[in-house]
Amino acid sequence: MILDSLSVVLGLVILIFAGDALVKGAVNLALRLGLPALLVSLTVVAFGTSAPELLVSVEAILDGVPGLALGNVVGSNTANILLVLGVPAILATLHTAHCETRRDYLYMLGATLLFIALCFTGRLVWWHGVILLAALTAILVASFRSSRSDDVDVEGAEPGLPGWRVAVFLVLGLVGLPLGANLLVDGATSIARAYGVSETVIGLTLVAIGTSLPELATTVMAAIRRHADVALGNVIGSNMFNLLGIIGVALLVGPIPVDPSFLRFDLWVMLGASLLLIPFVFLGQNITRIWGVALMALYLGYLTKVLI
């Protein structure tokens, strides 16, 4: 059990650092190749920051525990709103009243509803993945056409970064991500079986929280620096990519049966958490400390319900 716990912790640490390295390497390579900054931000950065969840989901399917893959994505989306926005709001009010995130939020909400509808087929298969990836492609194209391509601050961009360091970052990311995912999935699966807990529950809790740590770190720093738009946009973008990109790619690797408990409870919690963003996106509300406490309380209540 100790070795399994160490495997989970080590896997999470490797995933976090490898994901960051991959983003830095890929972003700087793309910019060196002359790709527009906005396109890099919408594609390379978005996929790069979601790489830990992607690798964990693919590894879970290959290891024959697809419930962990589905639990990881659904649990991560719930954690991204209740935990990732709740903790920073407790530290400092997120001034989201003037953040322009309506369009992206509607995209995320549409992705959530599409994903839930597909789950009610009872078994997600490859053509569901094609639908999800097609929806993601349409959103990226629409976002690129409706946004200006100049004056875009791209996460991980370092204009003076030497070529050899770009290569090192890419190698570290490409090697570290599958290694970390393998350690995390193997350790989490062993712990689940030892305690008689399903892989789905482990995915919804332990793995989901672990793979949401990069988003949590980013959002905390954004709150401290008073960049509420970065915090809210990071969560909305991550949730959209989790549902459309990660599950979409994972389904090309193998099918994912949908546990009936997801249809009764977890999917609706994810949708409910998404709807909680309406006051901040449309009604000009800031995410105050009181809201932060409320979001955290809801998340702790959800974890208690799932684990008991």
Image (cartoon, rainbow, N blue to C red):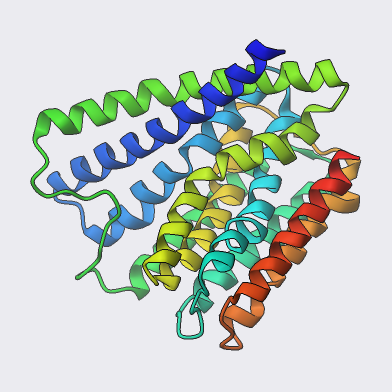
* Quarter holding residue 281: bottom right
Is residue 289 positioned above or below 247 on the image? below
Residue drawn at (36%, 75%) of the image: 146
Residue drawn at (59%, 79%) of the image: 280
Q: Position of residue 131 (x, y in %)?
A: 61, 49
Q: Position of residue 121 (x, y in %)?
A: 83, 46
Nearer-the-camera pick, 267 or 120 = 267
Q: Is 26 on the left-hand or right-hand side of 255? A: left
Residue drawn at (70%, 53%) of the image: 115
Q: Is 252 on the left-hand or right-hand side of 43? A: right
Nearer-the-camera pick, 110 or 196 = 196
Work out which quarter of the rendered image holds the N terminus and state it: top right
Instruction: Let me know if residue 94 appears in the view.
Output: yes
Is residue 118 positioned above or below 16 on the image? below
> Which residue reaches farthest front?
91
Residue drawn at (65%, 25%) of the image: 60
Q: Is 108 on the left-hand or right-hand side of 123? A: left
Is residue 143 positioned above or below 247 on the image? below
Work out which quarter of the rendered image holds the C terminus and state it: top right
Instruction: Let me know if residue 125 appears in the view.
Output: no
Q: Position of residue 24 (x, y in %)?
A: 27, 41
> Which residue reaches farthest bottom?
283
Marks counted in the figure total 0
Q: Position of residue 184 (x, y in %)?
A: 59, 23
* Quarter holding residue 84: bottom right
Nearer-the-camera pick, 275 or 83 = 83
